[in-house]
Amino acid sequence: MPQSLVLVSWLSIATALICALWIAQDCLRRPQHMAIMNAVWPLCALFGALPLLWFYLRHGRAPRPRDHGHMQGHGQETPFPIAVAKGALHCGSGCTLGDVLAETLAAMAPAVLLAFGWQTVFSERIFAVWMLDFVFAFVIGIVFQYFSIAPMRGLGLRDGLKAALKADTLSLTAWQVGMYGLMAIAVFGVYRPIFGTEPGAASPVFWFTMQLAMIAGFATAYPMNWWLIRKGLKERM
């Protein structure tokens, strides 16, 4: 990989980590009205970096506990396009955490990919990794969605999980379409034909590419979240 690309990758990753850490500590001082959002914002900063930090400060930051004003960005007062963006980011946080865990597992224990079709269904290792990514992202996404919907609707475990499945399945799938699409373009259209190789999970270029892929995922998930919220299948945030 060109050293210039490696340098840009490190800079992007470092910036994102700083943003994520700042938001995480800010959420400790200013807890979100919806508890799961205390994890959503820092996780999304891992790919959104400075633009996500701006969006958080503008539309997501909660008042200090001692303040008695209305919760910023909460409920029906939130403009609909902003609520949709928050819904898409909620989905993206589960995808982000799932992909980080899955890619790390695949790098540390490649044999796990055999259970996801490597060397049987897929000759390309990358497709088995994507299957593993999807499973992790889906499970974590449903858990995150449960802790959004169940408290707001007063649902029990069974009904809460059913509602979470309805709300997040299409959203997460739409996100993964954009994410996998950009990763495929990067790997098969840029890295292999131009550089004769592709970055692995130990390379900063891989995680920089994943940041771009997550942004593409946000773009493809946004219209789906618009529809889901309009239909009442997903809570407005």
Image (spheres, grey):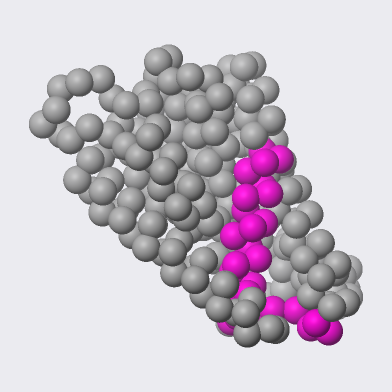
Residue at the spot x=14%, y=28% of the render?
67
Q: Quadrant of the C terminus?
A: top left
Classify 111 as above or below 36.
below
Outermost residue to the front: 4
Q: Residue 2 at what x, y percent from top left?
A: 68, 83
Toward which corner of the image does residue 63 lie, by quadrant? Answer: top left
Question: Image point 10% across, 31% down: which residue?
Answer: 66
Is any part of residue 136 visible from this angle?
no
Name the quadrant containing residue 75: top left
Q: Main secondary structure of the magenta part?
A: helix
Tell me, yes or no, whether the highlighted magenta stretch contains residue 64.
no
Quarter placement of the N terminus: bottom right
The magenta region covers: 195-221
197 versus 89 height, above or below: below
Residue 102: x %, y % from top left: 60, 66
Q: Residue at x 63, y 63 (%)?
A: 210
Q: Nearer the viewer, residue 138 or 155?
A: 138
Foreground: 108 or 33?
33
Q: At 56% from the left edge and 46% from the top edge, which residue is drawn?
A: 92
Q: Is residue 166 above or below residue 76?
A: below
User: Residue 40 location, x and y as percent?
Assistant: 43, 46
Question: Which image quarter: residue 231?
Answer: top right
Q: Is residue 161 left or right of residue 112?
A: left
How many numbered circles does the render carry?
0
Q: Residue furthest left?
A: 66
Does the magenta segment cover residue 200?
yes
- Between residue 146 and residue 172, name the one nearer to us: 172
The answer to whether 149 is drawn above or below residue 92 in the figure is: above
Residue 1 shows in the view: yes
x, y percentage for residue 145?
Answer: 50, 37
